[in-house]
Image (tube, helix red, strand yellow):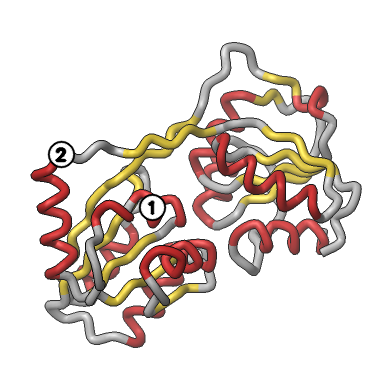
Amino acid sequence: MNIRGKKILITRDNEGNKDWQEKLRSLGALVKTLDCISIHEFDMNKEELAEIRRIIEASQYVIWTSARGVLYSRKFFNGQIASKLCAVGIPTAKEIKKYFGNPYLISQEMNARGLSQIIIKNEDLKNKKILLLLAINASDFLEKELQNAGANVKRINIYETRPIMLNDPILLSSLDVNHIFVASPSAAKGLKNNVIFDCSVNVYPIGITTKKTLDEYQIKTQPIPKYTGLEGLINQLNNN
């Protein structure tokens, strides 16, 4: 991955930006960060935690669409997990493996459509109990597709991604970057809120829904990466 000397702006939350910044700088990139989103984990009381654990024990499948969702789910699990664990994208799968063991199914694509196609094609979902652990602002596409395939789907929202609004928007030219990585629809909204596009740069959406949000704001984008996560964005920059 030859990105040495490339001037890149990353637009995640504070912790996510630190992670990506470290990886990009190790590859020689010149990185600027702008916190465009904040992440808010939902508090659960003892009764809610007990109910979620009961649902997990009764579920044949547990599905996550983000690594963040996996991180915030650790408190729901006690001991060995009988459910089949499924992931949207490689970063989510890596987080599942870190805490719970090897995932059962993984979509290469960083979107719900990719996982829905895999699980519906390979599994008999009729009357199967499936639990989705998601952000409250995540799309309902996956649960609808699984319900249409005959599954009994339960969705539990465990965190929220919120766009940040700065008091004074920043001129893009003042950031001195040539490329922007946008990792979520919320980050796209935060970018629009906080940056005045007074010059031209290459904007890279991480996936379909992020691109759609940028399109709504009439922010011109590069093609969607073929691979998931930061690796896909870097690859797309190299191919630009």
Q: 107 or 52, which lies in front?
A: 52
Among the 4 quarters of the image, the one containing residue 41: top left
Q: 74 or 176, which lies in front?
A: 74
| Residue 10, percent from left and from top | 68, 41
Q: Residue at x 74, y 58 (%)?
A: 234
| Residue 222, percent from left and from top | 72, 53
Q: Residue furthest front?
A: 79
Among the 4 quarters of the image, the one containing residue 193: top right
Residue kind at label 2, given as amino acid type: Asn
| Residue 23, percent from left and from top | 72, 52
Give the side of residue 165 with respect to residue 181, left or right: left
- When the figure is inspected, residue 94 is found, relative to residue 216, above or below; the finding is below
Q: Residue at x 15, y 39 (%)?
A: 45
| Residue 112, percent from left and from top | 41, 63
- When the figure is inspected, residue 9 is found, relative to residue 80, above or below; the finding is above
State the quadrant of the N terminus.
bottom right
Residue kind at label 1, given as amino acid type: Gly
In the picture, the disc for residue 69 is: 1
Look at discs 1 and 2 and give the one toward the viewer: 2
Pointer 1 local density, CA inside 10 Å: few below 14, some 14–19, many at least 20: many
In the picture, the disc for residue 127 is: none
Compute the Cα span from label 1 to label 2.
18 Å
To which residue does mark 2 refer? 45
Task: Give SS at disc 1.
Answer: helix
Give the side of residue 138 with respect to residue 57, left or right: right
Q: Residue at x 84, y 30 (%)?
A: 176
- When the figure is inspected, residue 56 is found, relative to residue 149, above or below; the finding is above
